[in-house]
Every structure is written in C-alpha cells, then in structure tokens.
Image: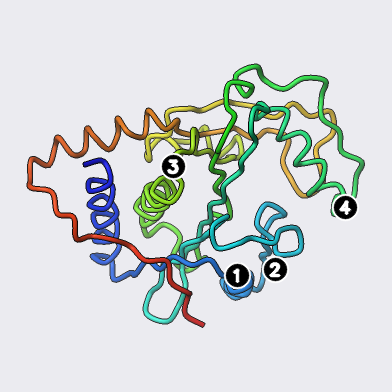
Amino acid sequence: MMLDWQCRLLERYRGELADMGLEVVPSTDFEALEAIVRRMNPNSKWELTPHFSTRENTFSTQDAFWIGVWAQDRCVGVVASKLQSIGDEGLGSYIRRYWNRVYQAGSTVDFEFGDWQKDILSNYSGDIIYSGEFRVHPDYQGRHFSEPMAMFLRVYSFLRWEKANLFYIFMEDENARRGSLASRVQMTIQIPDALNWRVPPSQAKSDYWLCGMERGHYHDFVRQWAESQKQPVSTESRIAVIHPRS
C-alpha cells in the first residue's frame, strides 16, 4: 500500500505542475544537467556545485538523478538527489571528510572545520539521501512551482531508495529564516548552523541549516495524505526514469 500511495502522490505533484503548464522529467544524465544549468542563467555563469558536478563525481544510474521542470522546450527549474551510503559512520563525521575532499581543490582559501560537529548529526548513518542544485530560471522565479517540484523530488527519492534513513538538504541561513521552502514542504528536521566552521570554503557559506526528513516521518506524511484521500488505490501509476530533452 505504501508504494501505491507514493505513486499516487507523484501523480498529484505532476498534476499540480501540469496545471501550471509545466512538465516534470526525471533523468540520470548529469552532463545534460550541467549544460541546462548554464543555459538557465548565462549572465550569472551558473555551475553545479561539487556535490553534483561531473568533475567531482562519476554517478551510475543507480547513484543519483535529477528532475527538470519544463515549459514546453525550456527548462525552468531543476533539483537533484544522490544516495550516500555511509555505513556505521555518523553523518557529522562523514560530512567533514566529504567536504574536505570535494571543496579543498576549488577553494581560494584554506578552509577548516571546527573541532566538533553537532551531536544530532551522529544519529544519522546507513543510506542517506542528499538533495541539492535547486535552481529556478530567473524569468520563472515567484511562479510558485518550487513547492510541487521539491515534493515530487522527495517522493521520487524515497521510491528509488526506499531503505534510506534520511533525506536532507542544506539551506542558507537567510532563506531558512524567512518562511522557508523547508517549512512549506514539511521538513521535520531543521538544524541551524549545522556545520561548525573555523573558516568556510570560498564556494560555500558559513551559516548553513541542515533540513531534512527521516524515513519514519516521511512514511507518516504519506499515510496522513492517504487517509485524507479516502479513495481506492490504483497500482497503475509508475514513473520511469528517462533522459531529458536536449
């Protein structure tokens, strides 16, 4: 039943975007994502962060995916997810090692973590989903499709990696404090100043919040939505991973 309701939820968010004249397309082609992001805002020279850049990552089709929101032949929004399998290591320890690897070469300063990371991060281990690269075309900002795009991504992520313990993102402090998207999409974990820096890398901020949802919270969210529908469940809805338009 959980699988069926998740598929129905995907159709709900796909339908909300369709009502705005938009189409959502999943993909595993990150070279295409890099090209699309550059075209979305050429004046600002948008590039992927080291979390998803093909310079730093070689993803298999099972490791990561992204979704594009399209207005006819124009991509107007993107966001990506990847699976981090960290075993018994706590997330705080893993983040320190991971950021040291992917940010050190590109930083124009010698960045440095503090001696500790928040204790709550040590509670998360095993399979973890990280999401990032949330971009909206400048011409389409304020058109209110960010929420269904983000919700579609989270449901699709848990469908792909059903045993993941946590879905998480980083948000800049100013965005997290101003009635943020994290609250609107019901992120049940919101940790201010989640990373303890002495000196942050030049490509990143020093005041990130970690926002996320544990698997149990996500299942509760799906069940509560299912109970609100009171309709027969269809097993016909399935979303296929397909390549993006060129």
| Quarter of the N terminus within the rendering | top left
Amino acid on which the number 2 mark rests in the picture: Lys
Say whether disc 2 or disc 3 marks the residue closer to the N-terminus: 2
Q: Residues within 10 Å of mark 4 (few under 14, many from 20)?
A: few
Q: Which mark is residue 4?
A: none
Q: CA distance from mark 4 to mark 1?
A: 25 Å
Q: Are marks 2 and 4 in contact (CB under 8 Å)?
A: no
Q: Which mark is residue 41?
A: 1
Among all residues in the image, which is located at the extreme top? 119
* Secondary element type, mark 1: loop
Camera-side residue of 1 and 180 = 1
Judging by the rendered image, the residue that carries numbered circle 3 is 181
Q: Residue 44 at x, y = what percent?
A: 67, 66
Q: CA distance from mark 2 to mark 4?
A: 20 Å
On the picture, is 30 further left or further right than 184? right
Q: Are marks 2 and 1 in contact (CB under 8 Å)?
A: yes
On the picture, is 151 further left or further right than 95? left
Q: Quadrant of residue 174?
A: top right
